[in-house]
Amino acid sequence: MLGGWEPVQPLAANGFEQGTVAMVIWGPGIATSFIQAGVDFTIGRLPYPTDGRNGTWGGGDLYVVPHNAKNSEAAIEFVSQLATVESQLTLFRASQVEGVLLPPANLDALAMSLAELPPQFEVLFAQAPELNPRAPLWQAFLASLGAAERAVVEGEKTPHQALDDAQQTMTHRFEEAFGE
């Protein structure tokens, strides 16, 4: 299954329904797709070496203010409001109404929302103390890596070339947003 977030969810859910997929390494979004599709599934943790550490990514999207924002003070105030426990819980509950589960990015709000989540999520959120934060421009990062992956699989580029291209793309995007 190649590509970013959107194409993977239906493929994985369909694969589980048809019995052609036995395991998927993903996160809360894929679990939501499975629940909506009526797929019977369980969630477990991937093992890692005793001298290693968990590589789980922190959920939620990041709110950032670009360095060249026209009204950075108002933008910072707005982002600060979005990050509050109350706002995060409101966004989480509104996302459920739309049929998409967007867990809170604020860890306090996440802890408060656990009782409202399907039981399958307990294992995922038990990893919260070990999360690695997501990078700004996360969706652009995924898209860039997805394009690199496709170029390698389709024989258009070597892995080294594809990753170099992805790095150049993201360097440019970060400079655009945050300056040099």
Image: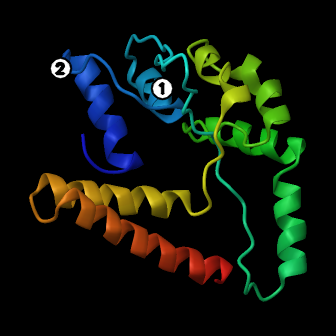
Local crowd size for mark 2, using a 10 Å CA cut-off: few (<14), some (14–19), many (≥20): few
Disc 2, SS: loop
**Which residue is identified by label 1?**
31
What residue lies at 85% left-to-right and 66% top-to-bottom?
78
**Is 111 located above or below residue 8 in the figure?**
above
Q: Which badge, 1 or 2, is on the more N-terminal residue?
A: 2
What residue lies at 64% left-to-right and 15% top-to-bottom?
122
Local crowd size for mark 1, using a 10 Å CA cut-off: few (<14), some (14–19), many (≥20): many
Residue at the outermost left position: 155
Side of 110 relative to 118 (left or right): right
Quick one: 167 or 73, which is closer to the camera? 167
Residue at the outermost front position: 51
Side of 16 relative to 97 (left or right): left
x and y percent of residue 58 in the render?
Answer: 64, 39
Separation of marks 1 and 2 at Cα, in angstroms? 17 Å
**Is 63 located above or below residue 46 in the figure?**
below
What residue lies at 17% left-to-right and 61% top-to-bottom?
158
x and y percent of residue 178 in the render?
Answer: 67, 78
- Total labels: the figure holds 2
Q: Amino acid at mark 2?
A: Thr
Quick one: 36 or 72, which is closer to the camera? 72
Disc 1, SS: helix
**Is 103 located above or below residue 150 in the figure?**
above
Q: Amino acid at mark 1?
A: Ala
x and y percent of residue 62 in the render?
Answer: 68, 56
Quarter of the image with the N terminus is top left
What residue lies at 83% left-to-right and 51% top-to-bottom?
83
Marking on residue 20? 2
